[in-house]
Amino acid sequence: MGTLEPVCRSDSEIRAGKDVIQVLGYVPADQVGALFSASDLVVLPYRYFDSQSGVGAAAIAFNIPMIVTDTGGLPDLVTDPVCVVPCGDPAALAEKILKVLSDDRLYRKLKNDAIKIEKAMSWDHIANQTISLYHRFQKKKDGTWQ
């Protein structure tokens, strides 16, 4: 993959004050962590989506805020509606990206939201929820349901 160099930035990206790294194609597993660790924001601009997002799951694992389109289960990956844009609306997508990257207060909130999502989707949390559910439906000694 080589070194991570900023791509040529548009005026709107320059106004946001951020370098933009563009990686096209397959990323080897041993380099995924470095890319996500260097990321401020993950954008999932799908038009159609009917499955799980490996990129979304990785963003959650690395506590990276996301902007997603309103298709399939993508909105479930974020907690704030400001992070969801209509499919096929590049102007709205660009506006959200600039807003998140240029508003430090909003970015910190979304970063905290990403941390909460990661904790809510952690194996420990899911295991505790599953155990709780089993206990709830466990038969009492007298044969009645809890």
Image: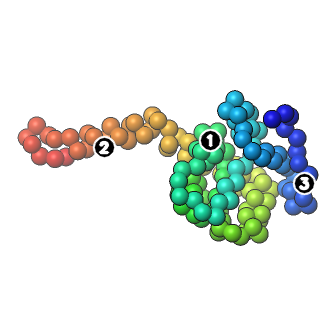
- Residue in view at x 91 percent, y 52 percent: 8
Q: Residues within 10 Å of mark 3 (few under 14, many from 20)?
A: few
Task: Indicate which disc residue 133 carries.
Answer: 2
The answer to whether residue 20 of the structure is visible from this angle is yes
Q: In the image, residue 125 lies at what x, y percent?
A: 44, 38
The N terminus: image quadrant? top right
Of callouts 3 and 1, which one flags the residue occurring earlier in the amino acid sequence? 3
Quadrant assignment, res 141: top left
Quadrant assignment, res 34: top right
Total labels drawn: 3
Q: Amino acid at mark 3?
A: Arg
Q: Residues within 10 Å of mark 1 (few under 14, many from 20)?
A: some
Q: In the image, residue 135 lies at what x, y percent?
A: 26, 39
Q: Amino acid at mark 1?
A: Ala
The answer to whether residue 115 of the structure is visible from this angle is no
Of callouts 2 and 1, which one flags the residue occurring earlier in the amino acid sequence? 1
Instruction: Report helix, strand or loop for mark 1.
Output: helix
Q: Which residue is mark 1?
A: 58
Task: Indicate which disc residue 9 carries.
Answer: 3
Whether residue 65 is situated above or below residue 82 in the rendered picture: above
Q: Which of labels 2 and 3 is toward the front?
A: 3
Left or right side of 43 for 10: right
